[in-house]
Amino acid sequence: MNNQTVVVLDFGGQYNQLIARRVRECGVYCELLPYNTPVEKLKEKNLVGIVLTGGPNSVTEQGAPRLDEKVLQIGVPVLGICYGCQLLAYMHGGSVTGGAREYGKRKLVVGKGGALFKGVPKESTCWMSHSYFVDKVPEDCVVTAGTDTCPTAAYENTQKKYYAVQFHPEVMHTEFGTQVLKNFLFEVCGASGDWTMKNFAEKTIAALKEKIGDKKVLCALSGGVDSAVAATLVHRACKNLICVFVDHGLLRKDEAEEVKRVFKDEQGMNLITVDASEIFLKKLKGVTDPEKKRKIIGREFIRVFEREAKKIGAVDYLVQGTIYPDVIESGLGQSAVIKSHHNVGALPDVIDFEEIVEPLRELFKDEVRACGFEIGLPESIVMRQPFPGPGLAIRIIGEITRDKLEILKDADAIFREEIAKAKLDREIWQYFAALTGSKSVGVMGDERTYFYTLALRGVTSVDGMTADWARIPYDVLETVSNRIVNEVGHINRIVYDITSKPPATIEWE
Ligand code: XMP
């Protein structure tokens, strides 16, 4: 039997993925689907509840997205949030009006209460983000909570099993938001809460075993968390997995050795390491333009992999570390290309295989990490910070040489070591050193020096789309600075990057 599922129907609001994540954090499997997903498709699932999200439209305007009436007849409870709350009222003869703009934290007063407010105090803070609201609830509904400006902040119809909140229970600023969601999931929908990573790993390995049997499988291992967890799940399920790790020589200090140690020695995988650093450095010689660097590395990566795949011959399956946000986002409009990211997207074109397996298609990033821990991967792999495909090539401004690579690797390793020592490694989303192209004058032991300036960068972020510079304590920065100038040659000046994104980007190139 498939997992008990809550479907979140997407009406275009900004927190929609977050709703799905919150539901899963409560232990209930959840999928985000377009608002107009056919009812038949919804019925195929082991559905226990439906959530309607917020959205930018007004339900009264022509062409606003609507819900198929038949969804309400499926028989599972429905929770409408923000736009979803207004839509449920509109569909049942209530009315919606504009003019009560509320944005940010508001005082929520629980009146009649009801199923969603079990365990929620009479007064608490909620997060609002709307300009329309329900001014008259449908006839057979009960208003359960309100705010100053929005008297119908929540209402319910227990008979027809629909529930609505104008505020956002998924947003952290709603003090008892998780409680409201839990009430919906467990009190109203009667969900069992059996979505755990232990369950997921067991089910996935069993399903992969059945699907793959003794067929041949290939995986491109990068050392990143997604491909690592995907490959390890497949490895647990079959004997014929071959992993190929292309070492382009632009990884951080000791990283290539770690990949070999973890996957070959500890996990016992059949790992082929291709040391291609000579080729990459040769191709990058004299190249200073960041976009050119990316293109060369992307192209060379595919070439090296193709050569390796030819040696292996045809395989039945190709493993990819696709995760749920990739699935949700694929097919959406393209935003302007600021930096052309190199990834393994083009690999399927150069490999002779029958089918792609994507064991992590259902998981959010934090779930991938939890799954990684569940199947026994070490923290260094599971909690690895995001690292760009072109690696240190885009952290050396200007031409890349072996010498510069060594300097940067050593400096970056010291920075990472000190951040870990200060226990900041889980707080800071990404942190690294970049070797700037500028040299400056310094003095060391009475001697004039003319050495490189090294930039340290640390950012907090959720998804890398926007970021703020991390407030690393001065004493940590001081230790890092002292250690780097003393232990690494050719650096006499260290700066800390205090720009957010935008206007800067996270990487320097
Ligand atoms: P930026 O520098 O664009 O970085 O603010 C956002 C996130 O993307 C990573 N990044 C890359 N990842 N190939 C990748 O796979 C690339 O070319 C690339 N450029 C940046 C960056 O490390 C950060 O996490």
Image (cartoon, grey):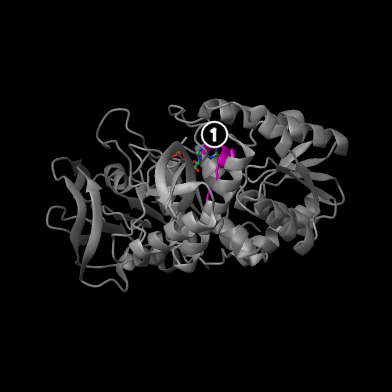
Give how far across and how far down residue 186 sits, in percent. Answer: 44, 67
In which image quadrant can residue 157 be found?
bottom left
**Position above or below: 403 against 146:** above
* Image quarter hosting the N terminus: bottom right
As drawn, is 272 to the left or to the right of 178?
Answer: right
Give how far across and how far down residue 466 sits, in percent. Answer: 38, 43
As drawn, is 387 to the left or to the right of 49?
Answer: right
Q: Could you tell me if residue 244 is visible in this image? A: yes
In which image quadrant can residue 123 be found?
bottom left
Residue lying farthest to the front in this orientation: 446
Foreground residue among 161 and 485: 485
Residue type, label 1: His
Quick check: is 95 in the magenta stretch? no
Foreground residue among 161 and 396: 396
Q: Residue at horizontal 29%, vertical 35%? A: 57
Q: Residue at horizontal 38%, vertical 67%? A: 183
Q: Which residues are magenta?
A: 385-394
Label 1 sits on a secondary structure element that is loop
Mark 1 within 8 Å of ligand 1, using the beta carbon: yes
Q: Could you tell me if residue 313 is visible in this image? A: no
In which image quadrant can residue 165 be found?
bottom left
Give how far across and how far down residue 302 sits, in percent. Answer: 70, 31
Foreground residue among 248 and 466: 248
The secondary structure that most of the magenta stretch takes on is loop
Give how far across and how far down residue 25 sits, in percent. Answer: 47, 62
Residue position marked by numbered label 1 in the rendering: 341
Foreground residue among 334 and 39: 334
